[in-house]
Amino acid sequence: MTQTTLKIQNSPPPIQLFITGGTIDKQYQETSGELIFPNSHLPIMLQEANVTLAIETTVLMQKDSLEITDEDREKIYQACIDTPQQKIVITHGTDTMVNTALTLHQYEALQHKTIVLTGAMRPFMLGHSDANFNLGTALMAVQLAQPGVYIAMNGQLFSAHQVQKNRQLGLFTEL
Amino acid sequence: MTQTTLKIQNSPPPIQLFITGGTIDKQYQETSGELIFPNSHLPIMLQEANVTLAIETTVLMQKDSLEITDEDREKIYQACIDTPQQKIVITHGTDTMVNTALTLHQYEALQHKTIVLTGAMRPFMLGHSDANFNLGTALMAVQLAQPGVYIAMNGQLFSAHQVQKNRQLGLFTEL
Amino acid sequence: MTQTTLKIQNSPPPIQLFITGGTIDKQYQETSGELIFPNSHLPIMLQEANVTLAIETTVLMQKDSLEITDEDREKIYQACIDTPQQKIVITHGTDTMVNTALTLHQYEALQHKTIVLTGAMRPFMLGHSDANFNLGTALMAVQLAQPGVYIAMNGQLFSAHQVQKNRQLGLFTEL
Amino acid sequence: MTQTTLKIQNSPPPIQLFITGGTIDKQYQETSGELIFPNSHLPIMLQEANVTLAIETTVLMQKDSLEITDEDREKIYQACIDTPQQKIVITHGTDTMVNTALTLHQYEALQHKTIVLTGAMRPFMLGHSDANFNLGTALMAVQLAQPGVYIAMNGQLFSAHQVQKNRQLGLFTEL
């Protein structure tokens, strides 16, 4: 292990966090009884986790992933290109998370970046959620994994082209 | 990327989770107004996180880390030796987490294993805790990091011999 | 103050708790992303509140109050008649809580009983809820108020025929 | 029931809420691992409960009730005298809640006021607490009970001179 490696390990490079919505960021609205998108809760999640990483947080959109369009995916791709960071975490709804991961995976221009998508099956704001855990796995994976596009869910790191969501079980499994 | 690599990524090897106590597992006792150790909450944490990894959970002790003795560290070391698993996560109080990590780090017999210690500054059971996030980072790190002894706290992965706890700030920083 | 009054105060008479559903008892279902009715959470609410009252809990139905029919209201009325208890608390969805209260209010056969309806704007299981507070107000009101049909919401006790729900604000106000 | 009575019921008179500390208001401090008194959480509790009562909140002190002195009780008494309100709720630690209630009970000058003490066995900020429920019972009791000094705990309303705390069980019972 060289001194260079050690330095990288102890002074982690900055991470770009892109927020696109999804269950992780939903909140219950009392008057309507519906789940809506208020301001993102990612900043408070990072604060409660006492995270000392250098993270730049950007809200690209706040959408249920069933409503993410091809245009939205183009916008996500462009943001990944535009950011100077090599390490990118994207919060995203789980229903079409694989679609967005595959879209990013196909672009050669992103092949030198490490991109990890994550989300949650239960909103952070409703308690007893997988949100904090999943965010932890994604932020660690983006620091340690080789360049590529991944999904971090259920404690595992899946390559974009080798994963599917099992809707009945609410779990991600390898293809 | 070879088929072998892919197989490793998608069928993660089993992980041994050793529980030693620490703030992460404390609970408020109503009658005494004190923080005590009931049964470990790690199983419910893994369940809420929808974790599909193969994890064997073993309670070695339930102690405040200020009360962890050399004998306890010997017991933790022996457990790491005895488990057939190569990937080990240890939950531990934060005050002497570095001491235990350094103890494990010095043993040559463990050099081929990946061992990640983690814990929390606020008990899981009190809500608004860093516990779930930290567990996520530890479980991902143990899958991706090279063999060695590490501490996963504050979103970062520290080598055992290059980290200290800043008690005033309640944060881990590089040495 | 007579000895008789003191005895009543210190040995509270048994209370019948009827559960009919409503937001107070909803839970988020991870796989569908919808709010459903699992088993009632009233027993765990009473347990967390360390309640030592003699309370008999009966689930009459588990419905969103917009789906409560005239037949359901007849069933609630009949249950209030059939119970030997004079003090009755009913958990109910807020949208038609006034309708059910008015239905019960019009029956002469219930005029000697104290009936308090309550519910919540945010499910108990989602945290940060008004559920526990409202249950507390209802259980205290049913012990202290004169016979009649009431709604306990927003910290106030309203007579059934003098209250309306303001849907825009999500609050109950006097007529 | 006269029109006057109805008016009182629907336009509840203002309530004075005195805060003296106690478990209900404690919070876990991450760096020390101890329970401390930050700013009172009563305002956020009232907000989450959607309370529409006219409540004036005043912090008299923030103390563990084992540290409440005779001088503190004199201060609480004086505050009850000085407030123009007839209806007073006091949050207080449970260990000496009975002592403070008895102190207030013996003053003739307070006999025309309704004073309800309450607290919690588990801090509001730690979740799964009895705090919200207890506050609900106290605020309803102060509106409905005859003048006198009471303790609202465990869902019951106890007269000051007829209640004791069972420390082993963590429950209030009649004398």
Image (cartoon, coloured by chain):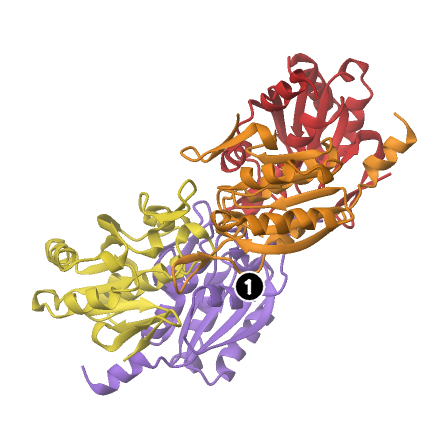
Chain colours: A red, B orange, C purple, D yellow
Q: Position of residue A104 (x, y in %)?
A: 77, 22
Identity of the residue drawn at 49% across and 83% down: C83
At 83% from the left edge and 41% from the top edge, which residue is drawn?
Answer: B11
Q: Amino acid at mark 1?
A: His
The picture places residue C72, in percent across and down from the top left corner, at 58, 70
Visible in this render: residue C30?
A: no
Q: Is residue B97 left or right of residue A139?
A: left
Q: Position of residue B89 (x, y in %)?
A: 66, 43
Residue C86 seen in the figure: yes
Residue B116, horizontal then vertical, whole percent = 65, 39
Q: Which residue is mark 1?
A: C41
Q: Secondary structure at mark 1?
A: loop
- Compared with residue B139, is residue D64 higher up or lower down, i.e. above or below? below
Residue D147 drawn above or below residue B40:
below
Residue toward you, D66 or D87: D66
- Which residue is most to the left? D109
Q: Chain of mark 1?
A: C
**Quadrant housing the N terminus of chain D:** bottom left
Question: Neighbour class for label 1 at 10 Å: few (<14), some, many (≥20)?
Answer: some
Which quadrant of the view contains residue A107? top right
